[in-house]
Amino acid sequence: MAHALPLPKYHQIYLVLREQLHEGLFAQGVPGEHALMQQFGVARVTVRRALQELAGEGLIARERGRGTRALAAHPAPAPGGGGSRTKTTRLTGLLENLVSTSLNTTVRVLEVTSVGASAEVAMALRVAPGETVQKAVRVRSTREGPLSHITTWVPGDFATQFGKRELAKKPILMLLEESGVRVGGARQTISARLADAQVASHLGIAVGSALLAVRRLIHDEQGRPVQWLHGLYRPDRYEYQMQLSRVGDIAAKVWVSSELSAQFH
């Protein structure tokens, strides 16, 4: 069992609420202080400190007598979306590797719901904000324990053929292809993130532990996005391996990737 990191309780609450705000869960309003006190089992001063952190980042606005409301967040650019600061890599053999990984792990489906697309999801999937998409949350495990916490969004017209039962049995890429989608490719970014309280509990780690954060956009052969994925992986059980080769003469110093594999244990 992981030892708890010395993160203040207010910061744990802040991490959870920040992630929920980025997912667009509070479009109808942020829960009040009393509701948050009951949800997290903490005192009012702790909740207020967490809300102050969110307000300081411009994620919420607090108005006396009117409660707390979410402010429009600036969504992170999707892979290949033209963001100036985000570099993306096209990964050879990625789709085959993803299916292989899925078939060699077990999955627990936490949630499958139809939701309105948040600004970030809408931009990634090229749909209108608020348009219905399928959101699925799953935890993948090996024999050694939890490996990853995966959240996916799929356009509503592509997700009519499968739900929670099917997602528990087959990789989502196989289900998409069985629904008539011809998967063409994927682009993704890899970064790092600290585990919030909810993800930490599912992955069996301490709040604040470092995780590999993967954002992956999968498109069909016509280039239409068919799946937007946020994945959080335990770095002690999962790693990416990329093989590089030089292109041109030694002065060019240009390297390209020729293969990528995922190792998990």
Image (tube, grey):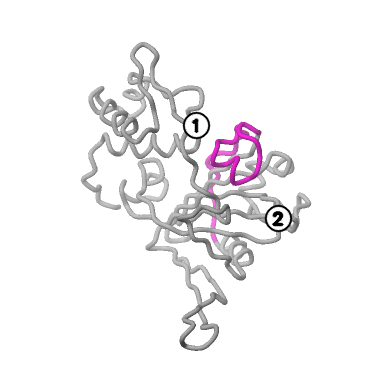
In space, the residues marked 2 and 1 are separated at their CA atoms by: 28 Å
Q: Is residue 151 above or below residue 185?
A: above
Q: What is the count of numbered marks? A: 2
Position of residue 2 measured from the top left corner of the image (x, y, whole percent) = 29, 52
Position of residue 155 measured from the top left corner of the image (x, y, whole percent) = 67, 42
Q: Name the side, left or right, on which 2 lies relative to 247.
A: left
Which of the two residues, 198 or 47, is positioned nearer the viewer here?
47
Which residue was labeled with disc 2? 223
Which residue appears farthest toward the bottom when viewing the image?
A: 249
Which of marks 1 and 2 precedes in the sequence?
Answer: 1
Please say whether residue 233 is one of the residues in the magenta stretch: no
Which residue was labeled with disc 1? 25
Q: Name the side, left or right, on which 127 lies relative to 48.
A: right
Q: Secondary structure at mark 1?
A: loop
Please say whether residue 117 is one of the residues in the magenta stretch: yes
Q: Quadrant of the C terminus?
A: bottom left
Q: Which residues are magenta?
A: 105-131
Q: Viewer-nearest of labels 2 and 1? A: 2
Q: Are marks 2 and 1 in contact (CB under 8 Å)?
A: no
Which of the two residues, 217 or 76, is positioned nearer the viewer here?
76
Q: Is residue 196 above or below residue 107?
A: above
| Residue in the image at 73% along x and 40% along y | 157
Position of residue 91 measured from the top left corner of the image (x, y, whole percent) = 57, 67
Which residue appears farthest toward the top when viewing the image?
A: 65
What's under tag 2, amino acid-wise? Gly
